[in-house]
Amino acid sequence: MLVAAAVCPCPPLLVPDVAAGAAPELDAARAACTDALGVLAASRPDRLVVVGPAEQEARGAHPEGTPGSFRAFGVDLDVRLGAGAPEPASPERSLPPSLAVGAWLLQRADWSDAPVEGLGVGEPLAPERCVQVGAEIAAAAGRVALLVMGDASACRTLKAPGYFDERAAGFDTEATRALGTADVAALKALDAGLAYELKASGRAAWQVLAGAAEGAGLSGELLYEDAPYGVGYVVATWT
């Protein structure tokens, strides 16, 4: 059963070593993520699953100890998922960037409150399948918590990675409202095609959350929302 969830953005720039001189620009987002992880710890979960976007369509599981790296972003910084013994490094076992950011957040918070595993979900994964995956996660342990990584649209401004799209603000407003109020139905209803066009990497992971939260009766709280680089970043908690 899902007992708590934290929604966090997943740009590598959240890691100060990657952001370098621009690091202070996301200090508020980092602080909100720390608060969200505190909510997860307070829920006393038996299992924490970190869910985030990955390139492949099929979902990919990553056991505790799976390594990740920010070397692709020019930084000699390695992380591993949770506090377990390191898994052997290999291309197949390496964390996708979204889960590497999640692992960094957990490492930064000295997470030791429950075993951790990761799940990468491909952006093309159909909403119905995302919901099904979420339900399977929630049913797999007594008290399950989710750390859900993902960004809203990347088309909020002319300098955004996806350039400006007038539909982006409306999409982000609805997604943010749904995440901040634990509106399961609204998350399920997010348009996968529109999310793809707006480069909203969090859509699939958010719909996994919706599937896991079905019937759990959780309430939401919005901790942070901004688009400092033309990309929507949201931090929320469900308890």
Image: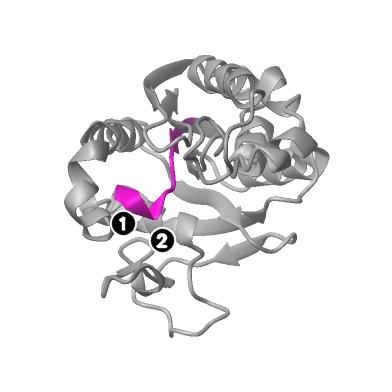
| Residue 95: percent from left, percent from top | 48, 67
Q: Quadrant of the C terminus?
A: top left
User: Which residue is depicted at the point 51% across and 58% down?
Assistant: 118
Quadrant in the rendering for residue 215? top right
Q: Position of residue 17 (x, y in %)?
A: 22, 60
* Disc 2 target residue: 100
**Towards the viewer: 116 or 124:** 124
Do the CB atoms of the residues marked 2 and 1 lie less than 8 Å apart? Answer: yes
User: Would you say residue 156 sits in the magenta stretch?
Assistant: no
Relative to 89, residue 36 above or below: above
Q: Nearer the viewer, residue 161 or 177?
A: 161
Image coordinates of residue 180 in percent, x first then y, are: 49, 18
Magenta residue span: 4-14
Q: Residue at x 63, y 43 (%)?
A: 199
Question: Taking 150 as reference, is 23 left or right?
Answer: left
Residue at image point 76% right, 24% down: 189
The residue beneath circle 1 is 104
Amino acid type, mark 2: Ala
